[in-house]
Amino acid sequence: MEKMGITSGQRNCCLDMLQNMAYATSEEKYIELYTSFKSTAPTTVLTYFNEQWHQIRHQWVMGMKYSSGNFLNSTNNRLESLNAKLKSVIARYSTLEEFVEKFFLILRVLRSERDYKASTTVQKVPVAFHSTTNKASLSYMQYLTPYAYDFVAKQMALKDKIKFTKDGSKLYHLSTAEGKIEVTTVSCQCMSWKSMRLPCRHILAARENTQLDMFSESLCDRRWSLPYYKSQQRVFLVDDQVTTEADISVVTFSSPKRILSQSEKFRRASKLTTKLAALTSETSKSNFTRRLELLQQLVNAWENDRKIKIDEDYTSTEEESDEIAEGTEDASSKVRNTDVLMTGTSSAHEPIIDPAEKGEAMIDLAEQEPVPSAEENSDVNVTTVNDDTQSQCSSLKDITMPPVIRKRGRPKGNEVTVIGLPKKTKLSLTTGHGSRLKPFIKLHTSVKEMVMLKWFVEKHIAKRAIKQQVMIEEDQVEVMPEKVSDAVLDDNVDVHLIRKYFTADAWLLLENVLDRKKINAVYTCGSCCHDISESDGSPSLICKHCLQWYHMKCVGISKLPKRKYWFCRGCHASPATE
């Protein structure tokens, strides 16, 4: 109303007139209503209507749509059905080659379904064929397709209810829900006749009134006849008229692989080096030293532009040495060690030759294999095994381990008072797994993403999106703002961190839910589920870990805690980092 500069009364009046124009049964009726609309509508509304809608009236006026032969179908259901079939077979992010292959697969299936339906339509004889006594009905059944005959049969059943007046000419006048129409024995002004081009109940009643045969091929459009239907179906054509699938050839070209930039190579390599650093740091001290030397020698080899081949080596692990010291296993047993034997080669595809014969580097980190001399490998740091180390390894059997002392636990009266009542335990700031609770703002980015994803989707979907990089679809997003956590309204929450896990449609839906959540912003207590603002003046506080508000009386606190961060009991039991 503000853009048009009209009042609410003018707006309602214009809407009523536009509704009548939309349901006009003919172009004459539309012109009549349009003339009245021009005389009463404001100038701004009339100008907008003439520019945007009047020129395309054949697309939205009901009477004009049916007169164009739309077969009483004003929806796009068939198109949506085809679209659903395409989406069920073709993935959204498929390549062009996959799309073409699956598209022609769908075409073959649809053609097979159409051929089956056409053969059934022609060859299947209706049961009512031999029991029909009406001659006109029998003639229509033999001439029309089953779909067209069902329409005509319904019209023949309704013809007896038609009551009209006749003037001196051959015209019949009739008042219907569409208005006053004129009917002859070969035409009608109703929408059924204009849309289907099949005899309607008005034409059949007029022919019966004039004692004419109700069956006439001229009343039926050619497209509804069985001979025309057979001529258009592939299953009834001769072999030389059918285009076989062998005549259709699809040529696809695979695009060459894109050359990675240096930054993209760095990102891919950094993922592996980060994992390698973690594996190196998690081992024992002796293994850590060996692995660190291995990495250093690998760096030295790559700096000198030498190519490396990695072979696994069989050595005793540190755990096996301990078992040998305890006498649980034989000293001759061997297990596979995680350290490797790296051999330098001149080419990635060249067979491996003895490095001593070829004059190249042999990097041996197994500590039990023979070490090449320094003259043969002058450019490589080689770790040697001294006599002291061997003597230390041989003396492991002489070490006596202390006996295992069984833990007795705490005394029985530790958890009760002097009078036998259970003591009140204080909540610890640790999660029970050795890690302290942190406020939401200090959590790692990956933990924040998992927490925020579980606000909008189910837990297993969030885990699959983060670990397997599976995009979240639109139908997996929670659409009810009431079921979304109130924590999403906190100022410390940045929802855009999880944008990369959603498809475009799913993200639009999430933003819509978030906007509705902010419009009706209500903070509820995590214990009593009542609105914080509607309480009886009871103070409240927020858990800095899960960002959930609580009434102080609901959590048994009489005054605000002195510590900087307060965490609820639920976060102590199951923190977000788990």
Image (cartoon, rainbow, N blue to C red):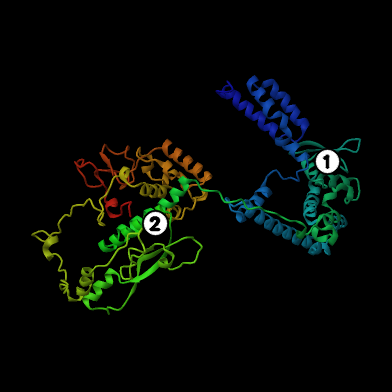
Question: Looking at the picture, does residue 88 appear above or below residue 355?
Answer: above
Disc 1 target residue: 188
Q: Who's the residue at 76% across and 31% down the image?
A: 29
Quarter occupied by residue 163 = top right
Q: 301 and 491: which one is in front?
A: 301
Q: Which mark is residue 256?
A: none
Question: Looking at the picture, does residue 73 appear above or below residue 411?
Answer: above
Q: Secondary structure at mark 1?
A: loop
Q: Residues within 10 Å of mark 2 (few under 14, many from 20)?
A: some
Question: Looking at the picture, does residue 338 appear above or below residue 105?
Answer: below
Question: Looking at the picture, does residue 511 appear above or below residue 341?
Answer: above
Quarter occupied by residue 249 = bottom right
Q: 73 and 82: which one is in front?
A: 82
Task: Tell me if I can see residue 479 in this picture.
Answer: no
Q: Amino acid at mark 2?
A: Ala
Q: Position of residue 136 (x, y in %)?
A: 87, 55
Judge left or right: residue 403 versus residue 157: left
* Tag count: 2
Quarter occupied by residue 566 = top left
Disc 2 target residue: 301
Judge left or right: residue 195 versus residue 92: right
Q: CA distance from mark 1 to mark 2?
A: 93 Å
Judge left or right: residue 111 versus residue 312: right
Q: Who's the residue at 25% across and 61% down the image?
A: 285
